[in-house]
Image: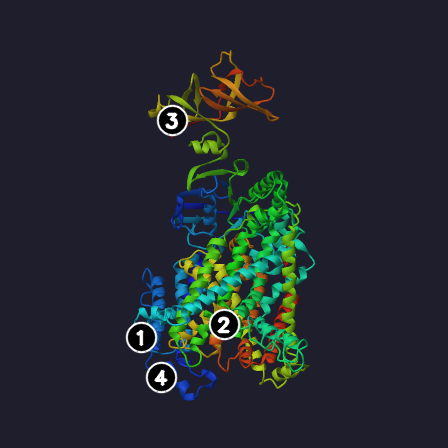
Amino acid sequence: MNKTSASSSLSSLDFRTKWVLLGLLAWIIIPWKGLEYGLFESTGSEILNAYAWKSVNTSFISLAVSLLFLLRPWKLHLKANLIDAAVSLVTFIVILFGAGLLNESLGYSAAIQLTFFLLIFSLALARMGFIQGDPFMTTAIVTIMASIAVFVLFPISTIFSKVVFLEDGTFTPMAFYKNLTSFGVARTLQNSLMLAVAVGMSSTFLGLCFSLFTVRITKRFKGLARIFSMLPIVTPPFVIGLSLILIFGRNGTINDGLLALFGTDGLFIGAGNEGWFHRSAYIYGFWGVFLAQTLSFTPICFMLLVGMVSTINPAVEEASVTMRASNSQTFSYVTLPLLRPGIANAFLLAVISSLADFGNPMVLGGDYDVLATEIYFSIVGAQLDYARASTLGILLLSFSLLAFVIQRQWIGKKSYVTVTGKGSGGYFQPLPAWVRGISTSVSLTWMLFTAVLYGSILLGGFVVNWGADYTPTLAHYEELWARGIGYGAWPSYITTLKFAAVGAPLTALMGLMIAYVTTRKRFIGRGVVDFSAMISFAIPGTVIGISYVLAFNTAPILINGTAIIIVISFIFKNMPVGIRSGISALSQIDKSLEEASLTQRASSIRTIFTIVLPLLRPAMISAIVFSFVKSMTTVSAIIFLVTADTQVATTYIMGRVEDGDYGQAVSYGSVLIVTMLIVIFLVEKFIGRSRVERA
Amino acid sequence: MKKHESSRVQLLNVVKSFGDNTVLHGIDLDIQAGSLTTLLGPSGCGKTTILRLIAGLELPTSGQVFLGDEDVSVLSASQRDVAMVFQSYALFPHMTVGQNVGYGLKMQGVGKEKREQSVKEALDSVGLDGFQPRYIDQMSGGQQQRVAVARALILEPKVMLFDEPLSNLDSKLRRQMREDIRRLQQELAVTSVYVTHDQDEALAVSDDVVVMKDGEIAQQGTPKELYLQPHTKFVATFMGDANIVQGEVIAGGEKSLLRIHNVEIATDKPMSTDLISKTIEIAIRPEALSLIPADDDAAGLPCTIVSRAYIGAAIEYSVKWNGQELFLVSATGNQEFAVGDTAKVLITPPGIAPIPE
């Protein structure tokens, strides 16, 4: 046993020297500074000038510290590990901040060397007994904390600093107040909140009706319920809005119908007479966005409520009836109050989703400004008002965080349903007639309406010009897909698949790691990781977009316009998906399984690979699939970050919408939806479910 | 299976805190090689923490842990030569019985053939050879328990740790399993540390019992010592039933003489002469008390019968003496008394322990 520990300390000594040597190698052969046009499109001299040794720059700090590590004059010191840790951490911070101050953007070699300093820091910490001296877990935790700091906390902090510093860097705290009270901000905020509350109420109501309908009224639509639960996942956020335009828009089906009846020369209007109906754009504005968001978020509320409705113990309703309560009284005084936490939860989730939604207000908003779109309009085109965008971003972030904190702290913990434990059998009482009537009619209407909307998306791509010319055509599809791989929709489609495929496994890994360390490990700084992970659930995509633009458009980390920033934004925007499935999967796995593996002489890294990961496989697959799909449909964050080279499917579609080319927009939209359905189907079919899931 | 090389386990002044919460306050513990020692105590007393410290699943805040001569205080679980049977068994649900039992050997790089042979032997020792290809969810609770034991045995650990291994079994199976565990442990002569909150289980399987309370060791000794000579009221009442009565010390020294009411009792227990003529508390086991008619001449405590319960092999009485209720067990066949009768309580050693706290 003594021999093992001696040899392990020897190998980790090698490890430290090894990383320093590799870092030095990178210092020599890889460019230190960031390349403005990327590695492949820069000229030879640009690349040459980016090398560490071509100019005086922060890389010499790295060089000096690396040489210091090779000598390690403190190696006999009692607290040598502490010194290792301190030196490497300080170097890491000094290089980042130094480069920021010197306006020097860091490149590949810098990234490599900074990573190595973090590694040395982690290993030194592990040897000081952090996480019971576990080098693998320590490295994982340090990596998580560093990436959260750089890609969540740092960007968020820049939107705060943007509103109190003027362009020239003078500190003016009153600037925030000035921006806050500037023209239009109050109205935009009011619009956003009103819309969010209205959408929250309507989608919760619809969700409740549909869950009562599927659980308590008829079993016939069980399969449909599954489809409805999938639709919001695979539907890009603005597609509902788009289909509303097809139906209700100026050239929409409804207008057409009314025109045919009551317009000039209409069916009910005598020949030659002026009709009393004209095309109108009533769908743009509050009601359009309200309708689109209600339709988009009802499935979310449904998913939440259907779980609660089906876990109500029938015995409590039976008890109520035996105490002479009528069905109606039982529903009002027993069933509904039991659902109250679920209803509040669904409401707040819909509020958060509505606040964050960018696509629908973008497509349907018209004059009705909301925070999410105003942030975008503040910085596109000639405006370029970063301070205003930041102010709006802070408002949006505060309100969605507020809703999220209420949801999580106050309501999330209340559940009357779980405390009753195992269901004791018995039968549900029939719902009162009025409840049956309302929820049946509402559900059927909603299903029909949704079917019409999705139908219009699918069909809209196959007619010449919806509203004007319904001649069947393949022109839109040909335009998008038949002009060769470098034209039409192909570049953005391939880019999207590529980004989503790279981002999805990383997102799942990051999410699961965070779930693992926050639920299974005790360490200093766990609160910070926990908190950051939590706020990542509530950060609207638009806020991520604006904060990334502000944070990564300047030194030290200048990655705007690259593919890297898009993949990173995917990772941190979709991370909650991974965290959530990780936490719920881990809560099913007994902690003693890992301990059993450790006492069987498996190291922690082998335990992760032989025990934890195989057991987490279903969670991992679902996290990968979901983040893949979400990456394909996201528009809010990414619209700030794409360039002509990194155009993705959603931004391409938004472009078509802005051009009024709805035919192409919906045909591309349907291709996206079908693509995602195929991906989900293939994964379920071929990767399948593991043995644990069945057990 | 062949006999293991087993080692002594020692904890020296071990303190363990979780944040501000100190759960072990300077534990000194010595567990002899080859013995089965039980850690017994109410929940939250720190017994499981001690087990986890020996396993290396927790590291001590201060103090040292020795396995044999080696200080393992800072070694992680995977570096220690111990094996553990978990309360939940912790069998890997995605592996077969064979893979579960062979896991530790595989981790150490033992070849497939040799591994299968060892798995066969280990499973055979718990009577489960042939079950290798089954998955865990196809095994009954008792079988899973045996697999867990086999998995721990196969590494021929110097120390085996059992964390309430029987708490998930029904009472009949529990009795059977505890005998099996004890038999295996004695055959292999492997040092074993066994955590339980069930005192019957502790008395039945142990060479040595360590009673714990609030993160400290209340008393360590053989089951018989703990039962017959508890050092504290806590130990006396935790290890079986005990009546605590006031009594006076008549004589001290090598042996002592006590008096309860008018009954004088000689004990083998040494007692400081300073205590002579002082009043102390005395723990009396129910079996040391018996009832005789009130008009009997023998010295006894006059009492009234408060309640009685027929439990088959014996009758349990509750009697009132001097304002205090006493609990006693009388074998069926002895003279019976009815509720409300007056009688005398006779006190006969052993089962009498002075507690000079």
SS state under label 4 = helix
Distance CA(mark 2)–CA(mark 1): 29 Å
Which quarter of the rendering shows the C terminus of chain A? bottom right
Task: Locate residue B251, reporting x and y percent.
Answer: 37, 21
Residue underneath mark 4: A54
Q: Please tell me the numbered disc located at residue A169.
A: 1
Work out whether residue A578 can be spotted. Answer: no
Nearest to the eye among marks 3 and 2: give it.
Answer: 2
> Amino acid type of disc 4?
Lys
Task: Locate residue B348, reporting x and y percent.
Answer: 49, 21
Q: Earlier in the sequence, mark 2 or mark 1?
A: 1
Nearest to the eye among marks 4 and 2: give it.
Answer: 2
Nearest to the eye among marks 4 and 1: give it.
Answer: 1
> Amino acid type of disc 3?
Met
Disc 3: host chain: B
Distance CA(mark 4)–CA(mark 2): 40 Å
Front residue (pair B114, B60): B60
Residue underneath mark 2: A636
Distance CA(mark 3)–CA(mark 1): 84 Å
Q: Are marks 3 and 2 on the same chain?
A: no
Residue underneath mark 3: B271
